[in-house]
Amino acid sequence: MPPRKKAAPRKKSTARKTTKKTAKKTARKAGAVSKERDKATNRAIELLADGVARDGLKGREPNVEIPLRTVTNMKWNKRKRILEMGDSTQTRSLFNVGQARKFMQTLLLAKGSRELIRAEKTLSLRGMYYMSLHTIEGTKEKTFNDQGESDTVLEDLEVSLGGLREELHVFAKKRGTMVGNITIEDNGDEIDCRRMGTGGYAIPSICEPSVIQFKKCDAKFVLHVEKDTVWSRFNEDRFWETHNCILTEGSGQPPRGVRRLLHRLNKELGLPIYCLLDCDPWGHYIYSVIKQGSINLAFESERMAIPDAKFMGIRAMDYDRCDLSPDVRIALNERDITRARQIADYPWFKDKRPWQREIKKLLANGFKMEVESLITKDISYVTEEYVPARLKAKDFLD
């Protein structure tokens, strides 16, 4: 008998491996927000469209109600210590010559957002503008003149639907950085913020729990600085390692992603938030936005504002206290003076004597100062002396 042929070796099953890969892809495809929020946002868009359709079918003028994003429609919730939106709205009608264009734009962006939610994809603000841009048939009229027009209407749509821009699957340009004693998971990728080199972790526009999860965190607090130049000094001196903290920056007034991440670090991990900002009305305003919320996003202050955030400095008294050179003084202009007085009248600052003294001292000095001015003392004065002294003395404004 001829020798029996050996059976070909069985190939190892790849079913489990494939399943894991598929699961990972599915997790990554989850997109901007949770399925539950997507469902709620999609339903809100459908209700908006149904209302317009019903009006048309019944021979009524189609319109949508847009909550007003103005100072007059804001209210200060003293108990919660946040800004909230009032009940005033503006009716946007199809047959009103002055409102027809924005009415059309509102529905165009709502349609685009619904398509993004269904596709489980996201677009930038710029991308959303182009997605809705076309010339109206039979005319030379474009749906949008520029991106600024699109961005403004998108903000109106957010407020109308009661959801953040990120929940419409639209994101802004990355602006903000983080480094420090925390490990996070970003859309399935584990990122150790202790090992981010000189550049740091770029804080994304969308920082919802479905995208970013907090893993191992050893930090005791978060130090938020106003600008990248100051943040780089803290990172290079490895301040976060020496003082066991997280360092963030927002390139001036922090964008939504940075504010949302700071809020989550404070609420979910219980980390105190200390703000190192310039000694001028604009630094004070940035602190106000972080702490109490902003006019444009007053409807979402619950998920953005950090009422317990503390202002570390730089302070008006620091010119004398730190024995700074006259070279660091930047004269206040009329706009600065007007803005400082406005901030002093904010309800959340008006009854706080330390803040009234701070603004009064700023105006009496007649000049403002940047955090970078501390470099005139020593390259690392801000990281080795100024901030450690403020932390030790718990010398903050609240």
Image (cartoon, rainbow, N blue to C red):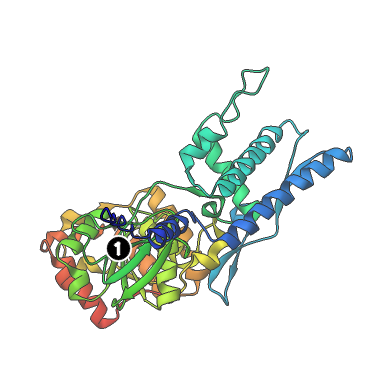
Q: Which residue is drawn at 40% across and 61% down?
A: 20
Quadrant that contains the C terminus: bottom left
Residue 99 % position (x, y): 70, 36
Identify residue for label 1: 191
Q: In which quarter of the view is residue 234 placed? A: bottom left
**Between residues 289 and 333, which one lies in front from this camera angle?**
289
Q: How many marks?
A: 1
Q: Which of 397 and 323 is in front in this view?
A: 397
Name the residue rendered at 48%, 58% in the picture. 342
Residue 57, above or below 225: above
- The answer to whether residue 283 is visible is yes
In the displayed orientation, state which residue is furthest to the front: 1
Kindly identify the amino acid type of the residue bearing the numbered disc 1: Ile
Q: In this view, does 275 lie above or below 255?
A: below
Secondary element at tag 1: strand
Residue at (38, 52) in percent of width and height: 336
Estimate how packed mark 1 is, as few (under 14), some (14 to 19) or many (20 or more) residues with alpha carbons within 10 Å. some
Q: Quadrant of the N terminus?
A: bottom left
In this rendering, position of residue 87 left or right of residue 235: right
- Residue found farthest to the left: 378
Q: Is residue 321 among the parts visible in the rendering?
A: no
Residue 325 locus on image (x, y percent)? 14, 59
Q: In which quarter of the image is residue 60?
A: top right
300 left or right of 208 in image: right
Residue 358 image offset from top left, x and y in percent: 36, 69
Q: In this view, does 391 lie above or below 324?
A: below
* Residue 182 on image: x %, y %: 30, 71
Please give the name of the residue rendered at 16% of the width and 72% of the height, measured from the top-left corner.
385
Q: Which of the pair 39/156 is nearer the observer?
A: 39
- Given residues 82 and 36, the one toward you in this image is 36
Residue at the farthest bottom position:
393
